[in-house]
Amino acid sequence: MAITAEAVQAQTKPRWLTPWLRGETWFAFLFILPSMIGFILFYAVPAVRGLFISFTDWDLLTPAQPVGLANYQKLIMDVDFWKALWVTLNYAVINIFIQTVLAVLIAVLMDRLTKSIFVRGVLILPYLFSNVVVALLWLWMLDPTLGIVNSFLAFIGIGRQPFLGAPSQALATIAGINIWRHMGYTALLVFAGLQTIPKDVYEAGAIDGASELSMFWNITLPLLRPVLVFVLVTTIIGSFQVFDTIAITTQGCPAQATRVIMWYIYEFAFDRFNMGYATAISIALFLILILITLLQLRVLRAGESDL
Amino acid sequence: MTTQAATMPNLASGPKLTRGRIMAWAVMILLIFITLFPFWWVVRTSFSTQKLLLSDTTSLLPVGFTTANFARVLGLLSTEQAIAAGGTGQAINFFLFLRNSFIVTTLLVLGQVFFSALAAYAFARLHFPLRDKIFFLYLTALMVPGIVTLIPNFILIRNLGWLDTFQGIIAPKFLMTPFAVFFLRQFFLTINREVEEAARIDGASLFGVFWQIILPLSIAPLTTLAILVFIGEWNDYLWPFLVGKDESVRVLTVALGIFRSQTPQGAPDWGGMMAGAIVTMIPTLILFGLAGRKAIDSIQFSGIK
C-alpha cells in the first residue's frame, strides 16, 4: 500500500522531491537533528566566524571594527609571534624525537619480554590523568630546593638544576613532563602495530643470517611505518597546541622561554582582549598545521605499507 | 611456534636468560620505576605534615603521617585548624569541585554518546538525501584543531550569558563530537542487517529498531566511547578554565590550577596540592580498576581511529 501511495506521489510531484517525502527521510533527519544543531552551533559557524573576527579589531566591549588584512599584516611583522613559533617548533622537535624513540623502545621491549596486561596498565597510567595533575606533580618533584629530583641529583654529585626556573632548561623540562605522560600511550600504539608484522618475515631474515639490529632497521621499522606516521602526525599536532602544562607551571616565563604559540594566543585573547589579532594567530596556526601534515604525509608516504 | 623458537632463539619469548634479556628487563624495570615513582611521591607528600615537608625532603615514607591535608582541601577543618595544619586559611572545598566534575562529565558522557549514536545510526543505516554530503562535513570538522573554534565558541557562550554555568561548560560537546559519530558509524556498519529487517517486518518502528536492537548489540563500542569521553572530559582544562572559573561550577582541574596560582610564592602548599591531585585522580583510578583491560583496549583503540 505504501508503494502505491509513493508511486502516485511520484507521478504528481517532481522527481527530486520524492525522496524528501518518504517517512524514512523524516525519521533520519529527526535522528541527526541534535548532532546537526551541535555541529552548526559549535563547529561550522564558529569556524567561519573565527575567520570574520580575524578581519576585525574587537575588544568584546565595543562593537567590532572591520580592519581588513591589518591583523595579518601585523602578524607578519610581529617579532614576538615568530619567536613564539620558534619556541613551539623547538618544543615539538624535542618532544617528537625523544617520545617516538622511547615509545618504539618500550614497544619492542614489551613485544620481546612480556605481553602482560599489568605492565601495559602501568605504562599507560600517566596518560589517564589530567595534564594539570601531571604538571603539578612534576612541579613538586622538580622544585629547586624541596624537590626529590634535585635531592637525588645533589646526592649523586651532578648538582641541583633550576629546571623550570631557567630560560635554558624550562622548555626542555616541559617537553620532558609531557613525554613522561605520553610515552606509555604511544608505546601501546606502536606495540599494537608490532603485532601486525608476520613472524615469518623475521624467520626468513634469521635464516639469511641477519643480525637482530639489522632486522630492526630493515624489517621492523619499515613495516611499522603506517603506525609511526599516525603517531608522528598526532604528536606534532598535539605539540603545536601545548597549553595546559605551561598554564600550570611557567605561564610563558622565564624570559619568554616557554611562550609557545597557544600561550601567545591566550594572552592576546584573554589578557588583552584583542580578539581580532588572537583569532588571526589561531588561523595562522591552523594553516601551519595543515601544511605540516600534508608535508609529513608526502615525505612519509603514509598510505603505503612495505609489506 | 616450536620451529620458530628453534630457528631464532633471540626473538622467541622463551624463558632463557641471556645477557641481552637481563639488560632488556633492567631497562624495562627502570621505565616502570620512572612511571610509578612520581605517583608514590604524590601519595607520600599528601599524607605528610605540611610543615615537616620543608625539613625532610628525601624520606620515602610520609613525614609525620597525617590525613589533615585531605581534611583541609575537602573543607572539613575550621579556618584555625587549617592554618595550624599548614594551609593559608582560605576555604578550599574539593567536595564541591568533585561534585561539579561529576555533573559535567556525566552529562557529557550521556549526551554525547546518545546523540552521536542517533546520528551514527542514521548515517550507517538510513537512506536520505544529502546523507553522504552531511557526513563528509562532519568528517572535515575532525581535522580542524580546537584552537580555531575556541575563541568564537567562548564569545558565543559569553553572548548567551552562559559564562559560569554548567550548560556553558558542556554545550560545545553535549550534542556531538565528529569523532563520536564517526566511531559509532563504523561499528553500526558491521551489524548484520537481517536482524533489523526481521524486526521491521514484525512491525517495529525505526526508533524501535534503534532502541531495542542496535543499542543492545552495541554495548561494547558504546562502553569504549563512554570511557574515552569520561577520561577526556574529566581531564579537560582549557575550556572549563575559560568559561567556568566560578566556584559554583568550578571543576577539579580548574580548581587545582587556581589552588596552584593562589599559593604563596615562598612556601607553596605542597601537601594540600598533592591531596587535591589525589582527589582528582581517584575517580579515574576506580574506572580503570573496574574496566581494567577494557579501558586499556579503549585507549589503545582511540589511537587507531
Image: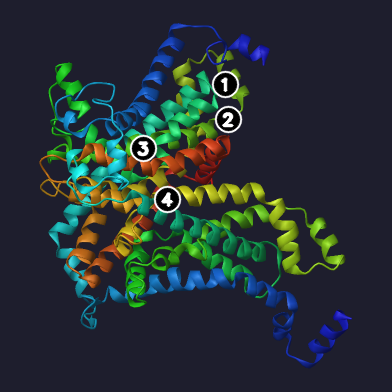
Tell me the kind of residue under disc 3. Arg
**Residue B115's x, y, as percent?**
58, 64
Which numbered dot is residue A197?
A: 2
In this rendering, would A272 be left or right of B70?
A: left
Output the chain of dot 1: A
Q: Which residue is mark 4?
A: B234
- Can residue A107 be seen here? The reply is yes
Of the residues shown, which amino acid type is indicated by label 2?
Ile
Q: CA distance from mark 4 to mark 2?
A: 36 Å
From the image, tell me which residue sits under label 1. Answer: A202
Label at residue A181 = 3
Question: Could you say which quadrant of the image residue A289 lies in?
Answer: bottom left
In 3D space, how far apart are the residues under numbered discs 3 and 2 (Cα atoms)?
A: 27 Å
* Disc 3 and disc 2 on one polypeptide chain: yes
Question: Residue under mark 3: which chain is it in?
Answer: A
Q: Is residue A1 left or right of residue A63?
A: right
Q: Residues within 10 Å of mark 3 (few under 14, many from 20)?
A: many
Q: Position of residue A100 (x, y in %)?
A: 38, 35
Q: Report the quarter where the N terminus of chain B lies.
A: top right
Give amino acid for label 1: Tyr
